[in-house]
Amino acid sequence: MLNKIWTKVIYDQKLSLIFWNLILIGISLLIMSMYPSIKLSGDALDKAINSMPKEMVELFYGGEAQSITTPIGWLSMELYGLILPFALIIYGVTNGINAIAGEEKNGTLELLLTLPISRVRLASEKFFSLVLGLLIIIISFSTFIIIFKDLFDLEFEYILIVIAGIELFSLALVLSSIGFALGTSTGNKSISVGLTYTITIFSYLWNGLVGLVSGIENLNNISVFYYYSGLKYSSNRIDLVEFFCILLFSLLIVSLSIFIFNRRDIRTY
């Protein structure tokens, strides 16, 4: 079972994956259970949200305003707007950087490189385990929401949750890939963490606030968050061109970092 690097990584992360799944399922359950009360008294919240500038709504709620008294509007505002995207980004970036740079900092990378496998295979399987971990978490809480949504009067087509899950995966993948690429190509965990989270925060703020600045309001498409649609009634299909562009970009920077890793000196401590 553990004769491959990626199976060993997933096995070693089993407790972490259980923790992440339980936490996100627990948060989902809490927010879902609040909906029946919000449905009865959410009109005042709708008015307050609709009175805010569009850019401020995108900044504080992670997307455009939707009626909070609808199932999709409630889940979008409270769950898919900020909590789930940033939880997955934290998981992906942390594990992406630790995949190689973390091992190098801890002094365990040299031991791994004594195994009869190439550096390319080592890094590739590490990245594959990262992608698999993201998918496990997304599939787990998405399945939970689909199965138990009717218990809390959340009526909507399950396909919307599936599409929102793919949107989450795309967003987390591209930022996790940046973290992995920086960690793998430089071997410096501290710099990789700082740069990746700087890119993430800047990208998020740029998407939310650039519309308020005259002259550059149309430049929010340079932010990765611009392409995250989240959970919407109107999002009933995947933009395949956008999805494959994100996938291609992620694979490109990861491949470049593995190429560099295969040729650079490994630091010793």
Image (cartoon, grey):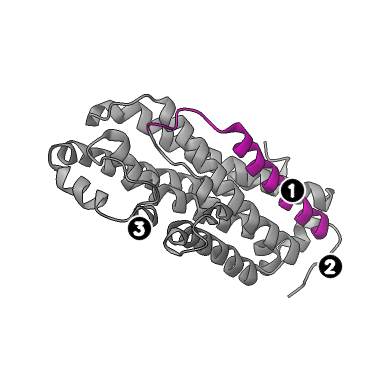
Residue occupying the point 55% across, 56% down = 219
Callout 1 secondary element: helix
For residue 190, side relative to residue 186 (left or right): left
For residue 30, side relative to residue 120 (left or right): left
Q: Does the segment drawn in magenta span residue 245?
A: yes
Q: Identify which residue, 192 or 230, lies in the foreground.
A: 230
- Quarter of the picture holding the N terminus: top right
Q: Identify which residue, 59 or 247, lies in the foreground.
A: 59
* Quarter of the figure with residue 108: bottom right
Query: Residue 89: x, y in percent?
Result: 51, 53
Query: Residue 244: x, y in percent?
Result: 65, 37
* Quarter of the figure with residue 257: bottom right
Q: Earlier in the sequence, mark 1 or mark 2?
A: 1
Q: Which residue is mark 2?
A: 265
- Quarter of the picture holding the C terminus: bottom right
Residues drawn in magenta: 233-261
Residue occupying the point 53% across, 31% down = 238
Q: Earlier in the sequence, mark 3 or mark 2?
A: 3
Are the residues flagged by discs 3 and 1 in contact, CB closer than 8 Å?
Answer: no
Q: Identify which residue, 240 or 11, lies in the foreground.
A: 240
Q: Which residue is mark 1?
A: 252
Q: Does the segment drawn in magenta span residue 181?
A: no
Q: Residues within 10 Å of mark 3 (few under 14, many from 20)?
A: some
- State the separation of the CA atoms marked 3 and 2: 46 Å
Q: Residue furthest left?
A: 41
- Residue 67 vs 264, above or below: the answer is above
Q: Amino acid at mark 1?
A: Leu
- Residue 264 vs 41, above or below: the answer is below
Q: Earlier in the sequence, mark 3 or mark 1?
A: 3
Q: Residues within 10 Å of mark 1 (few under 14, many from 20)?
A: some
Q: Which residue is mark 3?
A: 56
